[in-house]
Image (cartoon, rainbow, N blue to C red):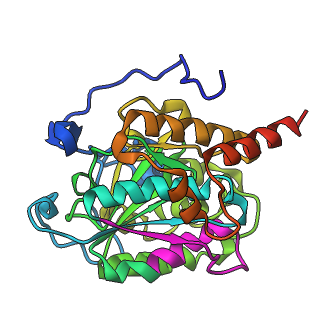
């Protein structure tokens, strides 16, 4: 059956660190660093910890207690991007995130303009984060092809004031599809540095779009070993970038579809395109509606998110997905 949760599942490994109470009494686990031995080039991976110290080109961060913001009210926002290629999923994706944001008192920002048409649309997340971050303490960027599946998880449980960004890693290394950033001078510098990697916009590389800039600045192992960069000098500030970052397992807030299990915060349909993305999205969107009344969205709310000429409701949008699949055969 289309969208049926797959029988092949990764073993659900225990997460150390203890639970933190969430909405409705549901416990959520504190994010734990993922060892970096897989994520960074061999000559930069000796330390092995989740937040790597060491001599970067920037001054070391000022130490502070992890998750201090749980006790001090911070201002959070969620940002997502919709472009012309996401018409079938954007209204529902935005509505799902708006319901979650309202539940916890966060702002939601839905950007519908490509900030710089000279680059592929995915690069615009860097400019949009730089545009909106100054108004908040923390900002979560989240790709439109995601669905929040567990509203009990709070951003306060993931944010860590001892670092400037929290990013998840999957089997390929860091993944910027869901990315939590702190308003700090270093973060503004990092956003500028990401955008400055113009040489990665075109060319044959292991990853696509802005992911190339992330892997380059982190000097991940898959990036450093690809033939396209062999013989080039590695990015000299990688140790400093990792010193300001916390890398967590994808199950914390960026579970890719093959590894998603019930109870994870977000399911991310990365890699699915066209009708398959549309069909799987609507399956998991419907599952979120049936599983969590707090996330339930009406057809009127979908129409509101779609604006003029946008969504006409769940059934009509799902029908358009099915029609696109039929056209493949």
Q: Quadrant of residue 263?
A: top left
Q: Give the x, y percent position of residue 310.
A: 67, 63
Residue 127 falls within the magenta-colored stretch: yes
Q: Is residue 143 visible?
A: no
Q: Quadrant of residue 34?
A: top left
What count of labels does the image hold? 0
Question: What is the magenta range?
Answer: 106-130
Q: Give the x, y percent position of residue 2.
A: 66, 26
Q: Say which residue appears at 41% left-offset and 41% top-offset.
A: 149
Residue 107 falls within the magenta-colored stretch: yes
Q: Is residue 49 visible?
A: yes
Q: Does residue 145 lie above or below 229 as drawn?
A: above
Q: Quadrant of residue 58?
A: bottom left
Q: Does residue 89 lie above or below 128 as drawn?
A: above
Q: Say which residue appears at 53% left-offset and 57% top-offset.
A: 300
Q: Give the x, y percent position of residue 75.
A: 25, 72
Question: Is 204 or 248 nearer to us in this picture?
Answer: 248
């Amino acid at each position: 059956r289309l969208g049926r949760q797959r029988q092949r599942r990764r073993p659900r490994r225990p997460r150390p660190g203890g639970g933190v109470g969430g909405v409705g009494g549901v416990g959520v686990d504190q994010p734990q660093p993922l060892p970096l031995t897989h994520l960074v080039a061999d000559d930069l991976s000796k330390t092995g910890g989740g937040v790597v110290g060491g001599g970067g080109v920037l001054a070391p961060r000022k130490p502070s207690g992890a998750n201090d913001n749980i006790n001090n009210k911070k201002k959070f926002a969620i940002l997502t991007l919709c472009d012309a290629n996401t018409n079938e999923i954007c209204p529902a994706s935005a509505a799902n995130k708006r319901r979650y944001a309202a539940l916890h008192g966060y702002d939601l920002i839905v950007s519908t303009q490509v900030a710089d048409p000279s680059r592929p649309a995915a690069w615009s997340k860097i400019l949009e984060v730089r545009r909106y971050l100054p108004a908040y303490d923390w900002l979560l960027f989240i790709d439109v092809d995601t669905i929040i599946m567990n509203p009990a998880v709070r951003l306060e449980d993931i944010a860590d004031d001892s670092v400037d960004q929290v990013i998840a890693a999957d089997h390929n290394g860091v993944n910027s599809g869901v990315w939590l950033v702190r308003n700090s001078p270093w973060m503004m510098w990092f956003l500028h540095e990401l955008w400055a990697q113009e040489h990665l916009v075109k060319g044959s590389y292991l990853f696509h779009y802005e992911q190339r800039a992330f892997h380059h600045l982190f000097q991940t192992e898959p990036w450093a070993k690809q033939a396209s960069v062999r013989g080039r000098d590695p990015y000299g500030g990688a140790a400093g970038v990792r010193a300001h970052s916390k890398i967590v397992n994808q199950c914390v807030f960026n579970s890719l579809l093959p590894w998603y299990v019930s109870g994870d915060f977000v399911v991310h349909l990365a890699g699915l395109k066209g009708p398959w993305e549309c069909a799987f999205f609507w399956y998991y969107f419907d599952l979120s509606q049936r599983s969590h009344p707090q996330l339930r969205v009406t057809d009127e709310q979908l129409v509101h998110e779609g604006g003029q000429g946008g969504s006409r409701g769940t059934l009509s949008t799902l029908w358009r997905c099915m029609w696109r699949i039929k056209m493949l055969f």
